[in-house]
């Protein structure tokens, strides 16, 4: 009705795009977030949306604020239009999102300002969930019920939102129960940012899911948002292990908001787009080869409409601003075919310390080898560190790193003597620029580490030099002075495929 595009789009007549066919063949869903303004304004947007995806998610239209401009007044028009478009194109709709601390109604703070015990907020939230889920019952097949409730940087580990402050963490369980009452058949999902790679945030969320499931909370699945950067995303093994462990809890896993920003990686556009292709291939491919992963939703599909551009122009999606497929489009296709990137040989000699300390040194303090009880192999530990920058330093790696890339770094890190600290991997580059020696430090990745377990630090990088490099080494540093820093299995490899 409100969707003229549905009548004119070839997809309405049954055209199936390459991506959509490949997803069907893989038995996975491929979805995208939908921006209604673009859908209404641009025939090409509507055409690609209808042809290439089998699942759609309103990017903003179903959030509490946009849906309820005034207390008690709903504006369903935008969400209705997207749901109608999906139905006209034989697509399923994933609803996003019932409970989130952002894009809340502007009237909500005053409505709950005198709400001492949270009863009012609880009633408003219940009504919102009931009305929204009931309206789309049978038409929205899955809901992101709660979004981003975890924030490990707070004292509690939770996002200390108005919901958490007034209702405590129990609001999460409650929201799922209300959603189930309103539609017993819809899949109910928990959605979270930054949990796609193994680490403290994924661990916290995993423990939360375990607790909620143990209480009988009706949670069917989990979404890993996966807003990655082409220099920061999980390795294949890391992402797959993470998918598997959530899936083993009985949860359906989906990659829910995939995009891959490119501007944080040095290099020209061609290098960055090639690195981006590999990032898409890896994330989509990991989902395809893991039976527990049901599908991938991209957070938009054209660089012309991406929320990442709100932070400055970027090109995070598989279609360019003129709706032409980029290398990333090929990466999605490769991933859908189950083809994963192939890492080359380890360019770091003696990265597993099996030949002793070799060329490795400590920039300060003492360096020693040890064996870990809970991870087989040798570890190199720097002790007596007196500053955060005191580092474990590799031998020269210049010859191994051809300009270009992309390269992937993986290393396992652990601390002794502190429960938390961030380990950063840095390439230290010495180069001659116009005859003068200059130094540059390229951060490859950082990871919150602890003395409890080994964690994998990953990063992806290309290399662009201002001049002629004369020396490059890899360093690990970052935790506070006095904390011993231990590293295992350092691997840097060129990725292709
Ligand atoms: C974003 C939208 O893309 C933007 O248009 C809006 O201005 C802000 O929200 N995590 C989420 C999504 O769960 O809802 C967010 O979407 C992106 C981050």
Image (cartoon, grey):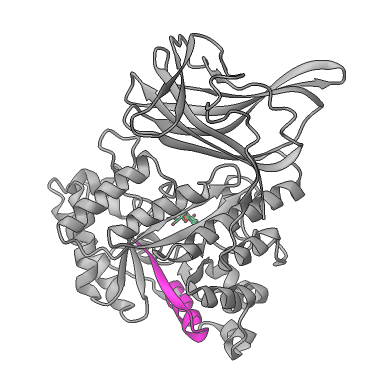
Reply above or below: 324 against 268.
below
Would you say 197 lies left or right of 462 here?
Answer: left
Q: Position of residue 483 (x, y in %)?
A: 39, 16
Question: Which picture quadrant has residue 429?
Answer: top right
Asked if the stretch drawn in magenta spans residue 470, the answer is: no
Q: Position of residue 235 (x, y in %)?
A: 52, 47
Question: Which picture quadrant has residue 128?
Answer: bottom left
Query: In the image shown, does 350 or 194 lie closer to the viewer?
Result: 350
Q: Position of residue 369 (x, y in %)?
A: 46, 19
Query: In the image shown, does 219 or 333 lie closer to the viewer?
Result: 333
Q: Position of residue 436 (x, y in %)?
A: 83, 15
Would you say 84 lies left or right of 42 here?
Answer: left
Reply above or below: 23 against 469.
below
Asked if the stretch drawn in magenta spans residue 91, the answer is: yes
Query: In this orientation, does residue 99 appear?
Result: no
* Magenta-colored span: 78-97
Find the residue positioned furthest to the bottom.
Answer: 13
Quadrant that contains the C terminus: bottom right
Count of numbered labels shown in the rendering:
0
Find the residue positioned furthest to the right.
Answer: 434
Residue at coordinates 65% horizontally, 56% vertically from top-left?
277
Query: In this orientation, does residue 435 appear?
Result: yes
């Amino acid at each position: 009705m409100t969707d003229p595009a549905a009548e004119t789009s070839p997809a309405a007549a049954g055209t199936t795009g390459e991506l959509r066919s490949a997803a069907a063949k893989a038995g996975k869903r491929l979805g995208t977030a939908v921006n209604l303004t673009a859908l209404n304004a641009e025939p090409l947007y509507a055409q690609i949306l209808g042809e290439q995806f089998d699942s759609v998610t309103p990017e903003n239209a179903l959030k509490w604020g946009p849906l309820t401009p005034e207390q008690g007044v709903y504006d369903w028009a935008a969400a209705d239009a997207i749901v109608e478009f999906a139905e006209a194109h034989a697509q399923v709709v994933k609803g996003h999102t019932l409970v989130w601390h952002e894009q809340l109604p502007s009237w909500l703070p005053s409505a709950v300002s005198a709400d001492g015990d949270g009863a009012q907020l609880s009633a408003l939230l219940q009504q919102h969930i009931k009305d929204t889920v009931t309206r789309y019952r049978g038409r929205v097949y899955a809901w992101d019920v709660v979004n981003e409730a975890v924030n490990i940087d707070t004292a509690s580990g939770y996002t200390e939102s108005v919901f958490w402050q007034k209702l405590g963490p129990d609001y999460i369980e409650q929201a799922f129960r209300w959603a189930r009452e309103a539609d017993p058949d819809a899949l109910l999902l928990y959605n979270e940012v930054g949990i796609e790679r193994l680490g403290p945030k994924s661990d916290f969320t995993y423990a939360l899911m375990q607790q909620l499931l143990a209480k009988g909370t009706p949670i069917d699945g989990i979404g890993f948002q996966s807003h990655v950067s082409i220099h920061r995303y999980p390795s294949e093994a890391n992402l797959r292990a993470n998918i598997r462990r959530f899936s083993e809890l009985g949860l359906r896993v989906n990659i829910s908001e995939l995009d891959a920003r490119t501007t944080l990686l040095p290099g020209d556009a061609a290098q960055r787009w090639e690195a981006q292709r590999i990032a898409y291939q890896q994330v989509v491919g990991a989902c395809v080869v893991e039976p527990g992963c049901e599908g991938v939703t991209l957070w938009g599909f054209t660089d012309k409409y991406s929320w990442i551009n709100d932070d400055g122009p970027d090109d995070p999606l598989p279609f360019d601003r003129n709706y032409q497929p980029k290398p990333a489009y090929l990466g999605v296709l490769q991933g859908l075919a189950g083809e994963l990137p192939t890492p080359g040989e380890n360019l770091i000699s003696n990265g597993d310390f099996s030949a002793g300390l070799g060329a490795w040194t400590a920039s300060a303090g003492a360096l020693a080898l040890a064996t870990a009880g809970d991870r087989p192999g040798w570890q190199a530990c720097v002790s007596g560190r007196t500053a955060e920058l005191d580092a474990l330093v590799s031998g020269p790696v210049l010859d191994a790193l051809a300009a270009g890339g992309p390269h992937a770094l993986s290393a396992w890190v652990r601390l002794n003597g502190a429960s938390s600290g961030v380990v950063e991997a840095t390439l230290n580059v010495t180069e001659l620029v116009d005859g003068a020696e200059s130094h540059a430090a390229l951060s490859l990745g950082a990871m919150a580490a602890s003395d409890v377990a080994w964690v994998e630090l990953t990063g992806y990088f290309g290399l662009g030099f201002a001049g002629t490099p004369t020396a490059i080494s890899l360093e690990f540093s970052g935790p506070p002075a006095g904390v011993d820093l231990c590293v295992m299995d350092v691997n840097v490899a060129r990725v292709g495929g």
